Image: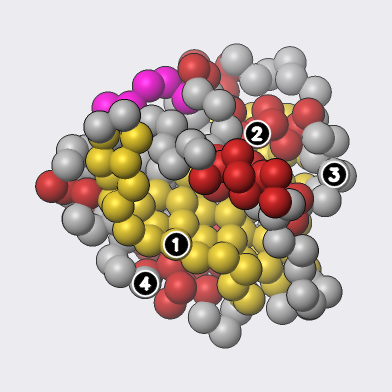
Amino acid sequence: MKSESSSPRHETLAPSHWILRHAHLVPPRARVLDLACGHGRHARFFAERGAQVIAADRDADALAAMEDVRGIEARRIDLEASSWPFANERFDAIVVANYLHRPHLPQIVAGVADDGVLLYETFARGNEAYGRPRNPAFLLEPGELLAAVDGRLAVVEFAQGMIVDGGRRAVVQRIAAVGLRRHWPPPLAPQAALAATSARPYAGE
């Protein structure tokens, strides 16, 4: 389910620094799924880079703002339906930020192409001490993303723990992982990107 976060509307936010940090893993003309896209901060970012983006959400108003954006196909979908809505599709990249619906986690991983990439970040257990979301249904267990990709994708970078920005604390879990047919080793983020993102640990995502 969509997290119960009270953070700002997606349209007011820059792309997640985790997504920016690993954007180089997504080819310019990739087919990208931005799952639970909100107002499309990541869909717009990748479309501007030449990707063909499926922006999926159940919020019709948010999707309407992307109808005329080149490179974005907005799909209004009940992401928590009993069946995975992309059963017959695979993507060069799947991007997920601040969203967790556990029943579909295996299908998300399986939806990554053999040489594709998964960029995923959301809140994790322990966040209930600092604010929303507090419901365990919206909080990853320690190492849960690692377990989800085990044997299916190769991990490029994984992080979990508490982050602090401007006095606000949150507990998050993040992963960047690639398909097993991706050329190995994949390039890590350029040093300039590492420096820029390390200086901005949290952006109210």
Q: Amino acid at mark 4?
A: Gly
Q: Is residue 174 left or right of residue 142?
A: right
- The crowding category of the residue bearing disc 2, from other C-alpha atoms within 10 Å (few below 14, some 14 to 19, many at least 20), is many
Residue at mark 2 = 43
Residue at mark 3 = 28
Q: Amino acid at mark 2?
A: Ala
4 and 2 marks in contact (CB < 8 Å): no
Residue 162, visible in the rendered structure: yes
- The crowding category of the residue bearing disc 1, from other C-alpha atoms within 10 Å (few below 14, some 14 to 19, many at least 20), is some
- Residue 118 circle label: none
Give the residues in magenta: 6-10
Q: Can you tell which of label 2 and label 1 is closer to the viewer?
A: 1
Q: CA distance from mark 3 to mark 1?
A: 25 Å
Q: Which quadrant is home to the N terminus?
A: top left
Q: Helix, strand, or loop for circle 1?
A: strand
Q: Amino acid at mark 1?
A: Ala
